Structures are given as C-alpha cells and as structure tokens.
C-alpha cells in the first residue's frame, strides 16, 4: 500500500485571514451574519463568500463555522480562506476544529486570538486528493449527526409541549379531580407550592482556567460544550489542570444543572452521571438543596 505523505506547514502558508467588521444585523436581510458563536442575524450586505469563521475573543474563542455562501462576519471573528486551489476548504474546516485553536489564545481578562498568532500555528496537511477523501468521510458522519440531532430536537420540543400542558396549563393526567386554590401567581392545583428558585438551589460560578487537549486533570465543561444541545458529548470536552482543593469545590456531580451566563445566556444542561469533571467560569451551577424536587423536573 502506498503511504500518504503529510507536509509540515504553518496555517499562514495555506490560509489568508481577514478580521470581521461590526454591522447591525437586519431581521430580513438576504445574507447571514455570523458572530463567534454562530449565526446572529441577517443583513442586506455581505463581505465574504465560501469561508471559515473563527471566533477570536471570549467564550467561543477558537470556535469554527464554515459558510459556503455570501456572508458577513462580525468584529469578534476572523475569516479564513485557502490561498489557492491546492487546499480543500472543507478539509481545512475539519483540521482547524481538531487543532483546538483556543489553546493558542492570549489575553489575561478573556481569551483572544489574532491573525498573527493563527499564521504561526503548525500542523500537517496531506495532498489535495487525500484532503478531499477525508473531508467526504467526515461530512458523511456530520450529516448523520445532524439528522440524529434533529430527532433529539423534535423529542425536546415534544417534551416542552408536555411540560407546558402539565405544569403551566395544569392539564396533567387526573387534573379533573384536583381542586384549584389561590396563590400569589394565581390559581394553582391544591397541594402545589409557590417557591423562589433561590429556595430550592445553591448557585456557584465556575472555575477560571484554560482548556487543554492533553489528558491532564478532569474534563472541563465550557459554554460551547452545551450551547447547541442540552446533553454533553463528553468525548469532545477538553481537560484542565486544577489543584486538589479547588477540584473538590468545582467538581460536578450527577443532578447538577449548568446554566450559561454569557455569550449564549440561559442555555442549560444537566449532569446525568458521576464523572471526573469541573465547570468553567462562564457557567453557573445549580445544586438542589432539597430531595423533594427532582433535578430533571427543575431542568
């Protein structure tokens, strides 16, 4: 079997970079507007076509999005495009995703990527024909994942509809035989109570550290690990170094609920099993202080 030679390169050898620019997204514009965390609106203007959008600052620093059409990229992104036709843009998209560009970020207050840093990132790249074959295989898997994700979204929509029917409209099974009583929120079923969230949970901000790909320390859950789904794909979650006393403080446990507090605020996920993991500072943990309430009900 003929061996495939991978060439050692810097990203600046194969990609040209452009800083995104601020724009006020319109609601019904023809062209998508992308921020560091994905689609943020639409506009009547575009600045790029067929490019990679890289989050350059904050919680989504290093996140990658590929857009084949005309688009606008906001000022918290960097756009990358191949310099010539000897590099397949779809392959480069998957390559950048594996490089974990966030680890190259600088900045003390929050992660920050620059064109200068990106140009100096080293990697290996195969011949164009091999790039296309690899991209085709990965795209097929992505399509399968997308289909399964859509099925999950449909099930979540059904669960949401049932929740509203039972716990907002109070049309739960057997509701016909339950009396309604007055409360500060209006009529509620007899036996139910009105509680503030603060009466039921303890809240805690997460741990401040940079994620790493090396298997050193516990898993490090970030906002980007839960912002697209309500479940966590632990195989894609990176690691972080942490001292033992801080690990005890930030360790996650089954039943903990995580809420994103910045960039994509309000998105939630639940920890479904005991796992060696801590959570990042862009998240808030909700921990139940009463056994009378199921964490899944609160979730």
Image (cartoon, helix red, strand yellow):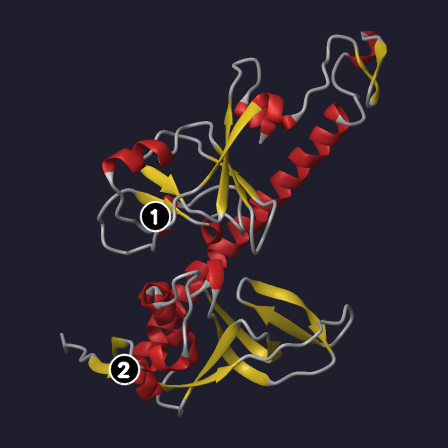
Badge 1 or badge 2: first in the primary sequence: 2
Local SS, label 2: strand
Mark 1, residue position? 235
In the rendered image, residue 37, in percent from the top left (x then y), is placed at 54, 62
Q: Residue at x 42, y 59 (%)?
A: 141
**Vertical placement of residue 295 versus 235, above or below:** above
In the rendered image, residue 71, in percent from the top left (x then y), is placed at 62, 78
Task: State the count of labels.
Answer: 2
**Vertical placement of residue 275 versus 150, above or below:** above
Q: Which mark is residue 15?
A: none
Q: Pick out the residue farthest to the front.
A: 108
Mark 2, residue position? 10
Q: Residue at x 58, y 31 (%)?
A: 299
**Vertical placement of residue 290 versus 201, above or below:** above
Front-lying residue, 151 or 47: 47
**Vertical placement of residue 202 versus 210, above or below:** above
- Relative placement, left or right, of 30 versus 68 is right
Q: Quadrant of residue 72?
A: bottom right
Q: Residue at x 24, y 36 (%)?
A: 244
Quarter of the image where the N terminus is located: bottom left
- Relative placement, left or right, of 202 versus 234 is right
Q: Quadrant of residue 11?
A: bottom left
User: How crowded is the residue under tag 2: few (<14 C-alpha within 10 Å), some, or many (20+)?
Assistant: some
Front-lying residue, 27 or 20: 20
Cα–Cα span, label 1 and label 2: 27 Å
User: Which is more foreground, mark 1 or mark 2?
Assistant: 2
Front-lying residue, 51 or 3: 51
In the rendered image, residue 199, in percent from the top left (x then y), is placed at 61, 21
Q: Residue at x 50, y 80 (%)?
A: 51
């Amino acid at each position: 079997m003929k061996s495939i030679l991978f060439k050692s390169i810097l990203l600046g050898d194969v990609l040209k970079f452009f800083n995104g620019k601020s724009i006020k997204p319109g609601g019904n514009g023809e062209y998508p507007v992308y921020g560091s965390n994905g689609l943020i609106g639409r506009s009547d203007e575009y600045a790029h076509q067929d490019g990679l959008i890289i989050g350059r600052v904050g919680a989504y620093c290093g996140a990658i999005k590929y857009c084949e059409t005309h688009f606008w990229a906001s000022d918290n992104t960097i756009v990358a495009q191949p310099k010539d036709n000897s590099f397949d843009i779809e392959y480069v998209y998957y390559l950048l995703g594996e490089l974990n560009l966030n680890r190259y970020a600088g900045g003390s207050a929050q992660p920050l990527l620059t064109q200068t840093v990106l140009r100096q990132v080293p990697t290996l790249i195969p011949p164009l024909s091999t790039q296309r074959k690899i991209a085709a295989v990965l795209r097929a898997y992505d399509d399968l994942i997308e289909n399964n994700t859509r099925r999950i979204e449909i099930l979540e929509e059904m669960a949401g509809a049932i929740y509203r029917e039972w716990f907002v409209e109070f049309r739960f099974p057997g509701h016909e035989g339950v009396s309604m009583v007055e409360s500060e929120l209006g009529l509620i079923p007899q036996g139910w109570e009105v509680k503030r969230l603060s009466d039921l949970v303890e809240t805690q901000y997460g741990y401040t550290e940079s994620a790493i790909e090396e298997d050193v320390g516990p898993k490090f859950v970030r906002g980007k690990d839960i912002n697209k789904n309500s479940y966590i794909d632990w195989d894609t979650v990176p690691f972080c170094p942490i001292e033992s006393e801080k690990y005890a403080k930030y360790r996650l446990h089954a039943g903990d609920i995580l809420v994103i507090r910045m960039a994509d605020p309000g998105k939630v996920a639940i920890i479904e099993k005991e796992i060696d993991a801590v959570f990042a500072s862009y998240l808030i943990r909700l921990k139940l202080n009463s056994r009378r309430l199921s964490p899944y009900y609160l979730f």
